[in-house]
Amino acid sequence: MIRQADVPWVQPGLKVILLTIANLVHCFTWRLPDSMTLEQLSMEETFLLAMPRKVPLEAVIEPKACGSLVYM
């Protein structure tokens, strides 16, 4: 069995993924479309291999004035 400590690229790879997500969350304003309310947001899933959502999530993103990126 392969352990996380046996694979040297796992930790740097996880840091890159976390940094990318942090920058997306930090540098954009996220909201639901104007036609959708919070009560209409469905978290139901369909039973398939990857468990996709029944109703795809729609989000509106607007860039913020982001002077610096988030660094780890």
Image (tube, rainbow, N blue to C red):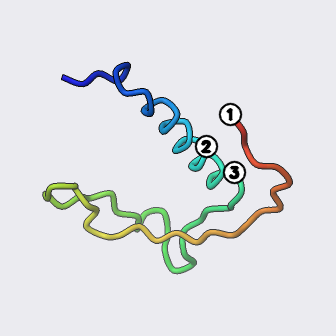
What residue is drawn where x is 83% and y is 61%?
A: 65
Report which quarter residue 4 is drawn in: top left
Report the Cα–Cα distance between label 1 and label 2. Answer: 7 Å
What residue is drawn where x is 63% and y is 52%?
A: 25
Q: Nearer the viewer, residue 2 or 34?
A: 2
Q: Secondary structure at mark 1?
A: loop
Residues marked 3 and 2 touching at CB (< 8 Å)? no
Q: Secondary structure at mark 3?
A: helix
In the rendering, which numbered label is found on residue 28? none
**33 relative position to 9: left or right:** right
**41 relative position to 27: left or right:** left
Q: Tell me the amino acid under the disc marked 3.
A: His
Residue annotated with mark 2: 19
In the rendering, which numbered label is found on residue 72? 1
Q: Tell me the amino acid under the disc marked 1.
A: Met
Residue annotated with mark 3: 26
